[in-house]
Amino acid sequence: MYRFNDFGQISGGGTAVLRAAPPVRQPALARGFADRLNDIRAGEMDLVVDLGADIGSKDWLRGAATCFGLCLAAWSFAPSFEAGTAAVPAPLDDRQWEEARALSFAPLAYGGDTGRRMAATGAVEALAETPERPRIDLIATMGQGDTLADVLRRSGVAKAEADRVAALIGGVMPINDLKAGTALNVTLGRRASRNMPRPLDALDFRARFDLKLAVNRVNGALALQRTDISVDDTPLRIQGIVGSSLYRSARASGVPAQAIQSFLRAIGTHADVGSLGAGDRFDIIVEHRRAETGETETGQLLYAGLDRANGKDLQLMQWTQGGKAQWFEASGVGKTSGMLQRPVPGAVSSNFGTRRHPILGYTRMHKGLDFRAGHGTPILAAADGRVTRSGWAGGYGRQVRIDHGGGLATSYSHMSRIAANPGAHVRKGQVIGYVGSTGLSTGPHLHYEMYRNGQAVNPASVKFTSQAQLSGAELASFRAKLRGLLNVPAGAAQIARKAP
């Protein structure tokens, strides 16, 4: 249906009626050049045609022609280049040609493109054999079970000279005191012939922390030179706040990891490590030596102290009584754990017995103790024994199980990393792994179980301790040494002394 104009015109004022009729079509008017120019001025004609659309249409053909014309114009205006003529070298005469041919390598004649290579001229004489280096400098390291003479012989020194050097060193210090890993700087000189070993021209090494030795050839003979190194042997004292983790706080304060483990073992014989508060302060003194050449060396733990906000303060120093070393309090009272070592220095978060499982959601037997500890805290073996399991154990995650003999065994679960292999023998207090949250676990902690004849028992019920007491002159000597340690300022260093 179309609206029809009764006047027969599209624009008019007549009345329109609704009837069935074909649509009114207006004839297309011819457009001239002026009309198209007006379209360009009005912006209705696109001068930049998209050649990717309406391929084959009039607009597309117009755009293609425009593009071709522009390219042709650009090419017509491009500058032209002519090849330059290079200078032609003068031809070689017969003598020059023969000389050049003698100095050329055959690969170049067959098309080699690696560049010009010149052969030796008549000024070079061929040698009967390649000359040796006048000297050889090398570093030899002593291995486990090596002797000084063995290392020198492996380096190319003649047996007689190696034995001579060992005798010179033995006159200054016991030759067996040289430790594995000692680096020897060896210089070998020129030898008379290839059939003879090179002579030893120089040798120097750090024999001890406070001693450097050198052997040099002087007028054809080997001579020993000794250099004593000044050493400051003031103990190193480090103090700090326990915070959320005693281990991490001590490590952040600069205490070596081995010293922290000794510290935890020491205070664990006199106090519950898991009961330490965040405001408690630790006091650690370790052996420390600093050479005048800049090297440092840290030794054993000398003193372990705790200043507790709530609880008894501790001042512990190691003392040997009856051939056995143990930690004594300032009063001379010593206490040694007889059987078991606390595996981590954390509080117990879940005890032995029935409980509702935090993940599974039902009540079942909890066959061990859960210790709260930060991720990566070292886990210590409770006693000497043999590792019977080391690996993944289902819901227990990474687990280590140790057989201590006599029907007693312990297991350590949810580890982040294991440090003990199956079948290995471990000592009490040895690191066997690190706290994690593997398996069915809600967060970093240690699940510690104990078995007696294959049956799980409460680890808290097994505890053996023995106590010792100093008295008389031994107690006086102990307290005098303790006072000397307590007089060391935190982080202090005295003037270096000359090593004996």
Image (cartoon, rainbow, N blue to C red):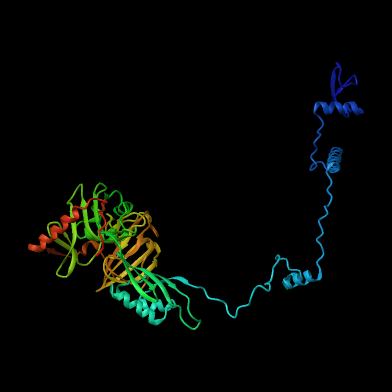
205 or 393, which lies in front? 205
On screen, residue 257 above or below 23: below
Left or right: 447 in relation to 93:
left
236 or 265, which lies in front? 236
Left or right: 164 in relation to 471:
right
Instruction: Estimate the x, y position of residue 167 in percent, counting from the top left.
Output: 32, 78
Q: How many marks?
A: 0
Can residue 31 be seen here? no
Which quarter of the figure has residue 500?
Answer: bottom left
Q: Which image quadrant: the N terminus?
A: top right
Q: Report the residue at 40% width, 64% height from top.
A: 394
Can residue 273 be seen here? yes
Left or right: 206 in relation to 283:
right
Instruction: Estimate the x, y position of residue 450 in percent, counting from the top left.
Output: 28, 66
287 or 249, which lies in front? 287
Instruction: Estimate the x, y position of residue 396 in percent, counting from the top left.
Output: 37, 62
Q: Report the residue at 50% width, 81% height from top.
A: 193
Instruction: Estimate the x, y position of residue 408 in percent, counting from the top left.
Output: 26, 70
Which quarter of the figure has residue 121?
Answer: bottom right
Which quarter of the figure has residue 387?
Answer: bottom left
Left or right: 239 in relation to 46:
left
